[in-house]
Amino acid sequence: QVQLVESGGGMVQPGQSLRLSCGGAGSGFSIYAWAWYHLAPGKQREQVAMIMTDGRAIYADSVQGRFTISRDNAKKTVHLQMERLKPEDTGVYYCMPYPAPARFTWGQGTQVTVSS
């Protein structure tokens, strides 16, 4: 089993930025599309961004224009640059290949809190 490791979260004020990172994928990183998911308090986990193997990215409407997903195949990492953060962006963020292979398990995620 492969458990991913997310990092980079924190507590920020509205309008500020954060950069999340995801690692621990091991071999085969480059063959997957990768996605970031957001688990807001009291809600279901939802996908907010996905990056294909060719670098094309797809975003949820709620983050379009504010978040940027990127990947570094050499370092086997995925990043989520979060700009102009809003209180509704608060929650735990997770990464996962898409579609998720059976050998991958959800990591602990990284907490993002946006509050004034």
Image: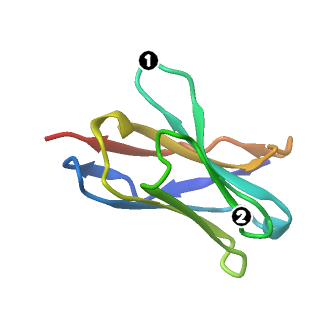
Q: Which residue is mark 1?
A: 42
* Numbered label tally: 2
Q: Name the residue nearer the viewer: 66 or 79.
A: 66
Q: Name the residue nearer the viewer: 39 or 7.
A: 39
Residue in the picture at 53% in, 42% down? 108
Label 1 SS = loop
**Viewer-nearest of discs 2 and 1:** 2
30 in relation to 41, above or below = below
Amino acid identity at mark 2: Arg
The image shows residue 14 at horizontal and vertical percentages of 22, 47
51 in relation to 99, above or below = below
Residue most extreme to the top = 42
Label 2 SS = loop
Amino acid identity at mark 1: Gly
The image shows residue 29 at horizontal and vertical percentages of 78, 66
**Tag 1 or tag 2, which sits nearer the N-term?**
1
Residue in the picture at 28% in, 37% down? 87
Q: Name the residue nearer the viewer: 54 or 9.
A: 54
Residue most extreme to the bottom = 74
86 in relation to 74, above or below = above
108 in relation to 70, above or below = above
The image shows residue 105 at horizontal and vertical percentages of 72, 42
C-alpha span from label 2 to label 1: 31 Å
The image shows residue 3 at horizontal and vertical percentages of 68, 50
Disc 2 + disc 1, Cβ < 8 Å: no
**Classed neighbour count for the residue bearing mark 1: other residues with Cα under 10 Å, few (<14), some (14–19), many (≥20):** few
